[in-house]
Image: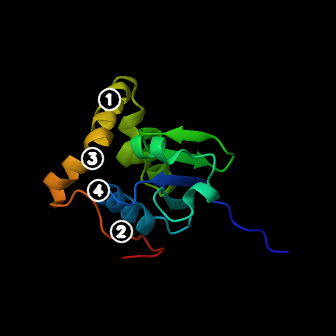
């Protein structure tokens, strides 16, 4: 009997946000051990597959689920994801007490205004087709 591999983290992200998709693509490339599952909250059948995730709330703040079922949110998801792919040093500062409080507020601002920020940085507010494929380069 073959045991199915369960990801250590499932990330529920906005697949229509160019900046969000860009980060997920970067994570996907570095996730050589397939520790992370990426789930687009706008994908067909999402609500049926993940009835415990409110897509409206997940569109407002990044959601993640650990293998033990525990839900994590916002920059805690970012920290956990980058730590899993061996880049903990890139995001370690997010755990520092004062920085954690400030960065959380900055994240909330980003999450609320990500479409406008995306438009400024990429020229596009939303993706027409933002698909992430395992092993994509």
Residue with the mark numbered 2: 130
Mark 2 or mark 1: whose residue is earlier in sequence: 1
Residue 45 left/right relative to 2: left
**Label 3 residue SS:** helix
In front: mark 4 or mark 3?
3
**Label 4 residue SS:** helix
Which residue is rendered at x = 42% and y = 70% of the image? 132
Mark 1 or mark 4: whose residue is earlier in sequence: 4
How far from the left and from the top, in percent, is residue 28? 44, 66
**Label 1 residue SS:** helix
Whether the residues at callouts 1 and 4 have beta carbons within 8 Å, the answer is: no
Residue with the mark numbered 3: 114
Residue with the mark numbered 4: 19
Mark 4 or mark 3: whose residue is earlier in sequence: 4
Whether the residues at callouts 4 and 3 have beta carbons within 8 Å, the answer is: yes
Residue with the mark numbered 1: 105
Camera-nearest residue between 105 and 42: 42
Whether the residues at callouts 3 and 1 have beta carbons within 8 Å, the answer is: no
In front: mark 2 or mark 1?
2
Quadrant of the snapshot with the C terminus: bottom left
Q: Quadrant of residue 113?
A: top left
Whole-number angstrom distance, CA of label 2 to CA of label 1: 27 Å
Camera-nearest residue between 59 and 105: 59
In front: mark 3 or mark 1?
3
Residue 16 left/right relative to 74: left
Against 22, residue 113 (above or below) is above
Whole-number angstrom distance, CA of label 3 to CA of label 1: 14 Å
Which residue is rendered at x = 32% and y = 29% of the image? 105
């Amino acid at each position: 009997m073959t045991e199915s591999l369960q990801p250590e983290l499932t990330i529920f992200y906005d697949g229509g946000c160019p900046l969000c998709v860009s980060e997920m693509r970067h994570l996907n490339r570095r996730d050589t051990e397939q520790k992370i599952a990426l789930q687009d909250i706008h994908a067909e059948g999402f609500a049926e597959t993940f009835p415990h995730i409110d897509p409206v709330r997940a569109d407002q703040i990044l959601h993640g689920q650990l293998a033990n079922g525990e839900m994590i949110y916002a920059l805690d998801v970012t920290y956990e994801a980058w730590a899993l792919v061996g880049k903990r040093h890139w995001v370690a500062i997010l755990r520092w007490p004062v920085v954690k409080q400030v960065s959380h507020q900055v994240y909330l601002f980003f999450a609320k205004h990500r479409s406008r920020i995306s438009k400024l940085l990429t020229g596009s507010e939303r993706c027409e087709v933002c698909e992430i494929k395992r092993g994509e380069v």
